[in-house]
Image (cartoon, rainbow, N blue to C red):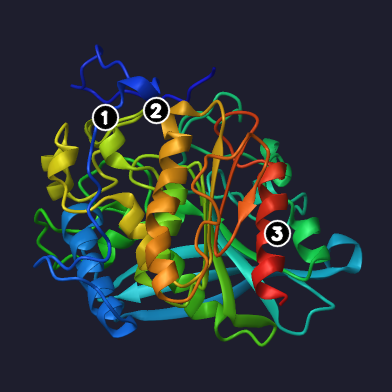
């Protein structure tokens, strides 16, 4: 088996040995999503609305951080337009969204591809890791000038992107297949919203709020990435060619964590897709399988809020777990995917979270996860909650997307 390892941060013990054996998972008790904090039972839809708000506040305070209300100004400028993209099947445009507040500004460059033959297209909204140009061969699509993570395989060094990798990630974002089914895509480089390194939250959208005095409840980078996705929705809602009632937020790995939190923060996302999101995403934290809270907070101290660090090696003290994050999204469809060799992200823990969220979906009249039995590799299961574990390791692959498109067909083409 091949496992994905995140880089160690300075100061973290080199002796960390992840558990990859089911028989070494210690017994644990999951907090019940249908029990209020005072111990009373959720018995109705109205009860659930109150419990949902309660759960959201707990995740916000204990884990992701409290994001500010957007009270600034957004200006959109078209950078390029191709009315005959994908052989005449789509309209492609790149738009710069400038967020301005109190004299500070941040530019989000969004690549939008919409099918021509669908008057109001449902849209997948997601963040990409290496820049919009990696999703397109069109030389008009800009190469980001923002800080980018070094990647030897991509040829990225000195934290700069380059044109040499134009189109390199097209297989990971199969836009032609999306358009063929009547779906659009809106994507942007995640570092436009908040560069992925720990600088004390002085850059990205955090810089739009200089008056904010940080404390243990302040928003981290995952919350910022989710918050930025909502600003993209602000723009998409104004496009006649977009069906704003059918927006799916999608993300891989750390951006899969952000996708789930974006859907929790913003009800305008009516579908969520979490690909290999693991610890802090779809996987049950209490299992301590693969990556743990202590490891993730040590390697990436800027992702979550400061208060989340108090649960390092103390998952049992966390008042919530990730099945409750999925529960918050009910009754909307949610799809969770894993790689069989990506033990770092705990595929079984991701599946079990969906199973544990199912009672909430049932309460709201939805199927939830149609089975409690971990499915064989490459055998997707789809209810209102969907799941697959596929051959291979850490990555958002063509196979994954084919299941996401089938899942969208199931829920958007009834």
- Say whether disc 3 or disc 1 marks the residue closer to the N-terminus: 1
Q: Residues within 10 Å of mark 3 (few under 14, many from 20)?
A: some
Q: Position of residue 155 (x, y in %)?
A: 60, 28
Disc 1, SS: helix
| Residue drawn at point x = 30 percent, y = 15 percent | 17
Instruction: Answer above or below: position of 345 versus 105.
Output: above
Q: Of residues 332 and 81, which is closer to you in this image?
A: 332
Label 3 to label 1: alpha-carbon separation: 33 Å
Is residue 400 visible in the rendered image? The answer is: yes
Q: Of residues 187 and 273, which is closer to you in this image?
A: 273
Label 2 to label 3: alpha-carbon separation: 29 Å
- The residue beneath circle 3 is 405
The residue most toward the top is 15
Is residue 184 visible in the rendered image? The answer is: no
- The image quarter containing residue 104 is bottom left
Q: Of residues 119 and 328, which is closer to you in this image?
A: 328
Q: How crowded is mark 2: few (under 14 residues within 10 Å), some or many (20 or more)?
A: few
Quadrant in which the N terminus appears: top right
Quadrant in which the C terminus appears: bottom right
Disc 3, SS: helix
Q: Which mark is residue 6?
A: 2
Q: How many labels does the image show?
A: 3
- Say whether disc 2 or disc 1 marks the residue closer to the N-terminus: 2
Label 2 to label 1: alpha-carbon separation: 9 Å
Residues at badges 2 and 1 in contact (C-beta under 8 Å)?
yes
Q: Nearer the viewer, mark 2 or mark 1?
A: 1
- The residue beneath circle 1 is 295
């Amino acid at each position: 088996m091949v496992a994905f390892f995140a880089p160690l941060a300075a100061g973290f013990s080199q002796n960390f040995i992840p558990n990859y054996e089911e028989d070494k998972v210690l017994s644990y008790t999951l907090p019940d999503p249908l029990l209020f904090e005072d111990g009373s039972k959720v018995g109705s839809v109205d009860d659930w609305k109150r419990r949902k708000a309660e759960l959201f506040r707990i995740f916000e305070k204990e884990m992701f951080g409290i994001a500010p209300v957007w009270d600034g100004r957004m200006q959109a400028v078209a950078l390029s337009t191709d009315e005959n993209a994908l052989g005449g099947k789509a309209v492609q445009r790149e738009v710069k969204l400038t967020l301005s507040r109190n004299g500070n500004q941040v530019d989000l460059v969004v690549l939008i591809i919409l099918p021509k033959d669908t008057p109001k297209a449902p849209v997948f909204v997601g963040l990409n890791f290496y820049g919009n140009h990696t999703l397109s061969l069109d030389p008009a699509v800009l190469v980001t000038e923002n800080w980018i993570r070094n990647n030897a395989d991509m040829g990225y060094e000195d934290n700069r992107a380059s044109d040499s990798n134009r189109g390199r990630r097209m297989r990971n974002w199969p836009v032609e297949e999306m358009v063929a089914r009547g779906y659009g895509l809106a994507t942007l480089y995640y570092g436009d919203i908040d560069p992925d390194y720990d600088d004390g939250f002085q850059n990205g959208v955090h810089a739009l709020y200089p008056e904010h005095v940080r404390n243990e409840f302040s928003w981290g980078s995952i919350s910022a990435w989710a918050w930025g996705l909502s600003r993209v929705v602000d723009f998409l809602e104004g496009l006649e060619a977009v069906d704003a009632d059918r927006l799916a937020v999608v993300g891989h790995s750390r951006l899969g964590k952000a996708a789930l939190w974006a859907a929790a923060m913003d009800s305008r996302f009516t579908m969520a897709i979490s690909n290999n999101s693991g610890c802090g995403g779809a996987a049950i934290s209490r299992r301590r399988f693969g990556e743990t809270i202590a490891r993730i907070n040590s390697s990436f101290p800027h992702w979550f809020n400061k208060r989340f660090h108090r649960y390092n090696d103390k998952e049992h003290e966390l008042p919530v777990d990730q099945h409750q994050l999925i529960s918050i999204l009910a009754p909307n469809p949610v799809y969770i995917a894993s790689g069989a060799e990506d033990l770092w992200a705990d595929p079984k823990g991701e599946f079990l979270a969906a199973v544990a969220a199912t009672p909430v979906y049932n309460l709201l009249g939805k199927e939830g996860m149609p089975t409690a039995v971990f499915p064989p590799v490459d055998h997707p299961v789809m209810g209102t909650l969907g799941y697959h574990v596929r051959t291979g390791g850490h990555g958002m692959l063509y196979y994954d997307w084919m299941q996401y498109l089938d899942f969208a067909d199931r829920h958007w083409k009834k």
